[in-house]
Image (cartoon, rainbow, N blue to C red):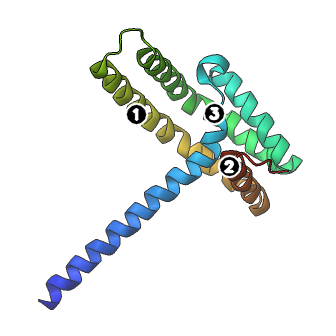
Amino acid sequence: MGMISLARSGRGRRSVVLAASIVLNIFLAAVIGGHLLRNHFAEVGPRGLLVRALARAEASLSPADAAAFRAVLHRDAPQYEPAAKQLSAARGQLEDTITAEQFDEDAVRQALATWRVASDHFFDAFSEPLVDALAKISPDGRLRLVTERDAERRGIPAH
């Protein structure tokens, strides 16, 4: 009884730790990815999106942090740009499907599934460059990124 109980509690803790780790990874990706994704991929394109994201980082980070962040994202752009293009195409298809004159529930479900897969693929490809970029900036810079993203979500100017 005692061994079974310990094994179950160990699995339970691992599940909680795994879930917390996943949530933390999603949160970190969302902080910076939100800056990238909120500007329409279809309109800006992945390369233009990178330029815009760097401009946003430069505006919110110190010059040294912005330069370090930019260097990593620029260096690793070939690693995540194909996934960004795929996500852009999936998002465009989803928007087209949702706004079609003849609404097709199955087509929307399929477009949502495609967008979800593309989104997962983008975050998989972008996570490592994001973590590397965040590691290169100061604790204050990381705090500023999180604070500004939170303020944007609530519609409050961060500056």
Q: Position of residue 140 (x, y in %)?
A: 79, 61
Q: Contact (CB < 8 A) between labels 2 and 1?
A: no
Q: Position of residue 92 (x, y in %)?
A: 50, 18
Residue 154, label in figure: 2
Q: Check disc 1 and give the amino acid type.
A: Arg
Q: Residue furthest left?
A: 1
Residue where numbered disc 1 is placed: 116
Q: Is residue 143 above or below residue 39?
A: below
Q: Position of residue 141 (x, y in %)?
A: 77, 56
Q: Earlier in the sequence, mark 3 or mark 1?
A: 3
SS of the residue at dot 2?
helix
Q: Quadrant of residue 94?
A: top left
Residue where numbered disc 3 is placed: 38
Q: Report how far apart the C-alphas of labels 3 and 1 lie in the structure.
A: 16 Å
Q: Residue furthest bottom?
A: 2
Q: Check disc 2 and give the amino acid type.
A: Arg
